Amino acid sequence: SDDSNLISIFFFVFVFQMTTSMLVLAALPVLISWWVMRREKKSVEEKQVKEGGETAENGKRAPSHYGNLTKEKLKQFTGKDTSKPLLVGIKGKIYDVTPGMEFYGPEGPYNLFTGKDASRALAKMSFKPEDLAGGIDDLSQSEKDILYDWEQKFKMKYKYVGDIVD
C-alpha cells in the first residue's frame, strides 16, 4: 500500500513536471515573437525621432497627416509628392506607412498600394489593377483571414491617421 502511494505520488509529480515543461515550451515562441515585435516597434519609433520631424508630447514623431480623406484626396499620398506622407487604406482606415519607405515608397514593391484602400488586393495577395480598386464583400473566408492579418500588422507597425470617407 505504501509502495502504491509512493508510485502514485511519483507519477503525479512526473506528470505535473512534464505538463509544466510543455506549457513553458508552448509559450516560448509566443513570448519570443512578442519581444521581437516590441523591439522592432521601439526601433522604428527611435529611428523616426532621430530623423527629426514634428514630435508629439510623448516624444514620438507625430504623423504628418491627421484626418479623414475621400478616395480622391487619398490618391495624392503615393510618394510622388515628397512633401506628403505615404498613406494606405485598409478596410476604410488610413495608415501612414512613411516609415516603411523602402516598401511603400515610389521605388518600393508595395507602392501600388499607396493612395488607395488596398484591402481587396492585400486580401487576395494580388497586384492586379482590378483588385486594387475592388470591394471586399465577395472575399472568401481565407481571404478575409489574410486581410485581418494585414490589418493587425498595420495596426501594430504604422500610425492610424484617419478614415476614408465618401
Image (tube, rainbow, N blue to C red):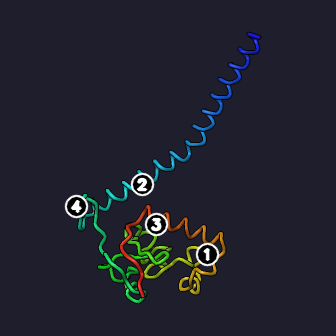
Report the Cα–Cα distance between label 4 and label 2. 22 Å
Mark 1 surroundings: few (<14), some (14-19) or many (≥20) residues within 10 A = some
In front: label 2 or label 3: 3
Q: Is residue 105 left or right of residue 84?
A: right
Q: Residue at x 60, y 67 (%)?
A: 145
Sequence-wise, the earlier of marks 1 and 4 is 4
Q: Which residue is mark 1?
A: 124
Residue 25 picture quarter:
top right
Across and down, in percent, residue 149 comes to 55, 65
Sequence-wise, the earlier of marks 3 and 4 is 4
Badge number at residue 154: 3
Badge number at residue 57: 4
Q: Quadrant of the N terminus?
A: top right
In front: label 1 or label 2: 1
Q: Which residue is mark 2?
A: 40
Sequence-wise, the earlier of marks 1 and 2 is 2
Across and down, in percent, residue 68 comes to 36, 80
